[in-house]
Image (cartoon, rainbow, N blue to C red):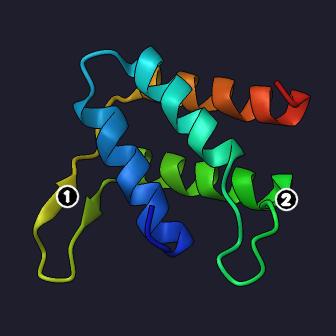
Amino acid sequence: MASMTRHERALYYAQRLKSSQDIFKEAAKIKKEIDSLIWSKDKTPLPLKEKLAILNEVKRIIIHGERSKEGLLLIEAGDNSGILDVIDSIENELKQGT
C-alpha cells in the first residue's frame, strides 16, 4: 500500500469499517494490516504506540464524522458503538501481541 499519513490511513480504515457487510472480518483484515505496517523511511515496524495512535484516530473519525476540505461528507457521525467495540477489540489484541 502506498505511503499514507496517520490521518489518511485512519480515514481509509474508518471508511472500510463503515461500509463493510461484515465488520468482524474487515476488522481482522485491518488488524493484520496495522500489525504489519512499517515506516517507509527505514522499513522498521511501527511501534505499538503508533499503531494505537492510528486506531485512536479511527475512533475519532467514527465518533465525530469526517468531511473533506471541500465540505463533502466522508464519514457520517452517529451511533457507531458496534464499530467502536470492534476497534477496542483490535487495540486489545495489538496490546497482547496476538
In the image, taking residue 18 as reference, residue 8 lies left or right, namely right
Determine whether the residue tagged by mark 1 lies in a helix, strand or loop: strand
**Could you tell me the amino acid type at mark 1?**
Leu
Q: Position of residue 22 (x, y in %)?
A: 33, 15
Tag shown at residue 74: 1
Q: Nearer the viewer, residue 30 or 10?
A: 30
In the image, taking residue 22 as reference, residue 91 lies left or right, namely right
Does any portion of residue 64 appear in the rendered image? no
Q: Nearer the viewer, residue 88 or 23?
A: 23
Q: Nearer the viewer, residue 58 or 22?
A: 22
**Could you tell me the amino acid type at mark 2?**
Pro
Residue on which the image places disc 2: 47
Image quadrant holding the C terminus, namely: top right
Is 10 drawn above or below residue 43 in the view shown? above
Does any portion of residue 9 appear in the rendered image? yes
Residue at horizontal 61 percent and vertical 48 percent from the top: 55
Quarter location, residue 89:
top right
Residue at horizontal 29 percent and vertical 35 percent from the top: 18
The disc, 1 or 2, on the residue closer to the chain's N-terminal end is 2
Mark 2 neighbour class, 10 Å CA radius: few under 14, some 14 to 19, many 20 or more: few
Q: Position of residue 50 (x, y in %)?
A: 75, 61
Residue at horizontal 65 percent and vertical 77 percent from the top: 40
